[in-house]
Image (cartoon, rainbow, N blue to C red):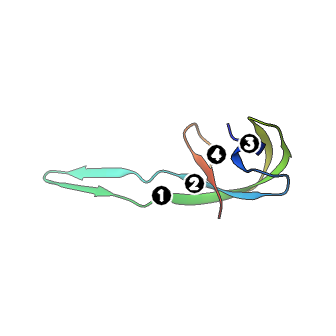
């Protein structure tokens, strides 16, 4: 929930990212990097929330994914 008070403006393009998985194997732990999988276009902003159109994606958008500046 980000809006104009957080600096978002109509026309901004944001990258959809998913946190990298953590793989555990016996005595090793490996954390994969975050994955960028799509783009959104912000078309309407309010003080505390914005509406964005998903323009491109390789995966379904899921809870806890992030929308960041590309």
Q: Which residue is disc 3 drawn over?
A: 5
Figure label count: 4
Q: Earlier in the sequence, mark 4 or mark 1?
A: 1
Tell me which corner region of the image, top left, top right, bottom left or bottom right, holds residue 12: bottom right
Residue at x 24% of width, y 50% of height: 24
Query: What number is the disc on residue 60?
Result: 4
Q: Which residue is disc 2 drawn over?
A: 17
Disc 1 element: loop
In front: mark 4 or mark 1? 1
Q: Earlier in the sequence, mark 2 or mark 3?
A: 3
Look at the numbered discs 3 and 1 and tell me whether their residues touch, using CB distance below 8 Å.
no
Percent of width and height locating residue 19: 47, 50
Question: In this view of the protein, can residue 57 be seen by the observer?
Answer: no
**In 3D space, how far apart are the residues under numbered discs 3 and 1 (Cα atoms)?**
27 Å
Percent of width and height locating residue 29: 23, 54
Q: Earlier in the sequence, mark 3 or mark 1?
A: 3
In front: mark 2 or mark 4? 2
**In 3D space, how far apart are the residues under numbered discs 4 and 1 (Cα atoms)?**
16 Å
Q: Is residue 50 above or below residue 70?
A: above
Q: Which residue is disc 1 drawn over?
A: 34
Residue at x 38% of width, y 59% of height: 32
The local crowd at label 3, few if under 14, some if 14 to 19, many if 20 or more residues have their Cα within 10 Å, is: few
Look at the numbered discs 2 and 4 and tell me whether their residues touch, using CB distance below 8 Å.
no
In front: mark 4 or mark 3? 3
Q: Earlier in the sequence, mark 4 or mark 3?
A: 3
**In 3D space, how far apart are the residues under numbered discs 2 and 1 (Cα atoms)?**
7 Å
Look at the numbered discs 4 and 3 and tell me whether their residues touch, using CB distance below 8 Å.
no
The local crowd at label 4, few if under 14, some if 14 to 19, many if 20 or more residues have their Cα within 10 Å, is: few
């Amino acid at each position: 929930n980000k809006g104009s008070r957080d600096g978002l403006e109509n026309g901004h393009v944001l990258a959809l990212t998913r946190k990298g998985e953590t793989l555990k194997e016996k005595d090793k732990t490996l954390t994969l990097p975050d994955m960028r999988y799509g783009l959104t276009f912000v078309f309407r902003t309010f003080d505390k929330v914005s509406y964005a159109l998903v323009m491109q994606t390789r995966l379904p958008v899921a809870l806890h994914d992030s929308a960041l500046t590309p």
